[in-house]
Amino acid sequence: MPKVGMEPERRAALVSAVIDEIGEARTLDVTVSKIAKRAGMSSGLAHHYFGSKEQMLIAAMRHILGVFSQRVVAGLAQTQDPHDRLRAIIRANFEDHVFDRRKTSAWLSFYSLSQRNDDAATLVRIYQSRLRSNLMHELRLLCPDPARVERALSSLIDGVYLRAALGNAGPDPSAAETVIQAADALIHANTQRSV
Amino acid sequence: MPKVGMEPERRAALVSAVIDEIGEARTLDVTVSKIAKRAGMSSGLAHHYFGSKEQMLIAAMRHILGVFSQRVVAGLAQTQDPHDRLRAIIRANFEDHVFDRRKTSAWLSFYSLSQRNDDAATLVRIYQSRLRSNLMHELRLLCPDPARVERALSSLIDGVYLRAALGNAGPDPSAAETVIQAADALIHANTQRSV
Amino acid sequence: MPKVGMEPERRAALVSAVIDEIGEARTLDVTVSKIAKRAGMSSGLAHHYFGSKEQMLIAAMRHILGVFSQRVVAGLAQTQDPHDRLRAIIRANFEDHVFDRRKTSAWLSFYSLSQRNDDAATLVRIYQSRLRSNLMHELRLLCPDPARVERALSSLIDGVYLRAALGNAGPDPSAAETVIQAADALIHANTQRSV
Amino acid sequence: MPKVGMEPERRAALVSAVIDEIGEARTLDVTVSKIAKRAGMSSGLAHHYFGSKEQMLIAAMRHILGVFSQRVVAGLAQTQDPHDRLRAIIRANFEDHVFDRRKTSAWLSFYSLSQRNDDAATLVRIYQSRLRSNLMHELRLLCPDPARVERALSSLIDGVYLRAALGNAGPDPSAAETVIQAADALIHANTQRSV
DNA sequence: AATGAATGAGGATTCATTCAT
DNA sequence: GATGAATGAATCCTCATTCAT
């Protein structure tokens, strides 16, 4: 059974299994044995690769948040127009394969974990910083008080995610549009007010 | 030691202990023994009153969401002006004694629980319905497509809550203002667009 | 099944079970489950009383060394003559119910434990100090360099114990006499030499 | 990577690693992986050479006790005088490179092992027989009841070892002298008494 | 010969829940 | 009503041993 060079595949399989397992169970209370079985290996091997259950969860969380960032980067590459770029950022967070039930559910569980786990908290902070930085870059070109708009906008994104995780519906194509329209409204109001 | 007529006090003490314990631990993984000790009684008695740990959690969650609604009702009693009433609804959700670290943390844990627990899900749905109904009542008087605004607004409220739960800061007086300003922007945009 | 006031009996039963189990297995590698079963209770209850396996072992060790001291005290109460008292101290360490296979085997395992466990090391130190102090009190009256004799004598006692633990024989009535004669020889030589 | 004729070196490296590992950990609870890593090879290879962890331990124990005997033989080669030879036997057991913390600690762990492992018990018996035989050979020339003296003397040697293993001190030059002086006293008393 | 991937049994510990008192 | 003793299932993690490469 032992094969060499399996580490990357094994780790990827475990990360994926963690997300599926948590997404299905809708809680972080999943057992290492079940995760390992889902990933097609023994619990011992899972520990061999990650050291502890906690590290497995963190790796899965890093993966999820990493995918968010990747999508954003991909979206930004498409255009130079600030408005379009802002929309791209928002849409990236709501693409079907990111914004599905299992992922949002795992996402909420991980956010909950970050309340008490330092590594998880760091990951959240990094993700939030990146999102803020991306949003700010465009908002600076679009309105006089970008920080204020950014605050509302990122909270809104998280809120929509939260509601998606709680709801029973699958990917919702209108979610992105709701946020985009709100963004327009916030920018417009911000511009008017400062005049 | 046994006293009669203690039930209401005991139950209240337990509910409060659950919230404090969860708020401190930042997870639902708290033990019945600790909760009971915090409430000044034995774990056996806690079970006597609530039947199971799950029911204790649900009762605490009901309490938290109930307080939200109470504050909203109290706020609405102050005025008849739609704009002011809308602001009152929003402010009710961010009053200091509701919007503190412990409560928001417990709130997030409960939301997470509602992903997998039917009773908890029902409570969330009831709370969301009430909030929606309250917001809609005012929005209907303020803009042509109130449902759209309500959707964004309630997500925004949850998002601000979520970020509060994740952050380390205590009550943030600006949270309510951020949401109120966003509400104004959304209403304004909704009005303009539909013209 | 729950009864009140059982704690002392439970703890004593566990301590006794630890000694029997270790004495029989001839190693500290015994399971809490087996100890608990031998003591007539569940492993959970054993943990309830001692908190951890380590603490169970320490309690058992304390018990064994405590019995040594008790026997010495009892022996010393019999006479005032230094020579007789010295013999009493030695004999106390080799009484049948102390110097039997199970106890000596457990004793060796505990000594081994004291190499790496601070609590166990402290217990050994206390026991050795007491023994030294008792021996010195008499030796001071019997020879000019009591410290030297004490050093040899206490090492000899431990050595005899060690050999008893390794051997397969049960209580050896001659063990005490061997040590007593050696003590006489050491005292005599110490007296002569210093002249 | 595989080299031929490496077996003796590999085995020696493992034996040495076992002693170091046990001496440092102060317990037999060391893992094969750590031993193998310390010896510069994989755990699989360690098993290849010794078949099982138990056999590794036994080999290490055989090595330690073998060194004792070698030192004794070397010491005996120096002189023909019974008194000097007796002292040589004793001193051989307390030479610095034998009587150091790591070795005595491993020694105690192995003695403990011999309580439950037949192979280990055999090794101890062989070592004790050799020591007894060596001591007896000289004592027969020095006193009327050599067996009695031998019994006390060998127990004393083990006792001094035991205390060394428990203590924190390194090699103690006075240990040998303490035993030698005790030997003189025992021989003298034995001679007197029998007159 | 050599590696280290892989297994799976085993064990300490925790904790919701029950129940005798 | 009230206690906390008692149970035992559940779970993480470790590690000797095996085996494909």
Image (tube, coloured by chain):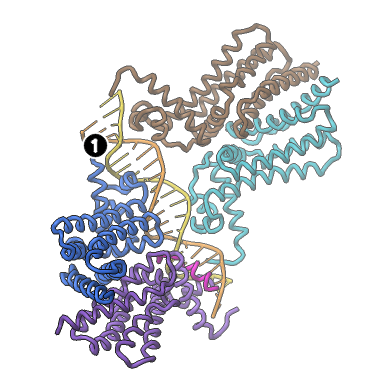
Chain colours: A cyan, B brown, C blue, D purple, E orange, F yellow
Residue indicated by mark 1: C4
Picture quadrant where residue A158 is located: top right
Residue B168 location (% of width, % of height): 61, 34
Q: Which residues are magenta?
A: D26-40
Depicted B158 relative to depicted C28: above or below: above
Depicted C136 relative to depicted A164: above or below: below
| Residue extending furthest toward the front | C195
Residue A130 location (% of width, % of height): 73, 41
Q: Nearer the viewer, residue C137 or C51?
A: C137
The C terminus of chain B sits in image quarter:
top right
Asked whether C188 falls inside the magenta stretch, the response is no
Is residue A7 in view from this perspective?
yes
Depicted C52 relative to depicted D129: above or below: above
The answer for which chain carries disc 1 is C
Asked whether D34 falls inside the magenta stretch, the response is yes
Crowd rating for badge 1 (residues with CA inside 10 Å; few <14, some 14–19, many 20+): few
Q: What residue sits 21% from the left and 82% below the top?
A: D147
Residue A110 location (% of width, % of height): 58, 41
Q: Nearer the viewer, residue B162 or C121?
A: C121
**Amino acid at circle 1:** Val
The number of discs equals 1
Picture quadrant where residue C123 is located: bottom left
The N terminus of chain B sits in image quarter:
top left
Depicted A77 relative to depicted B90: above or below: below
Picture quadrant where residue A106 is located: top right
Q: Circle 1 — which element?
A: loop
Residue D121 falls left or right of residue B93: left
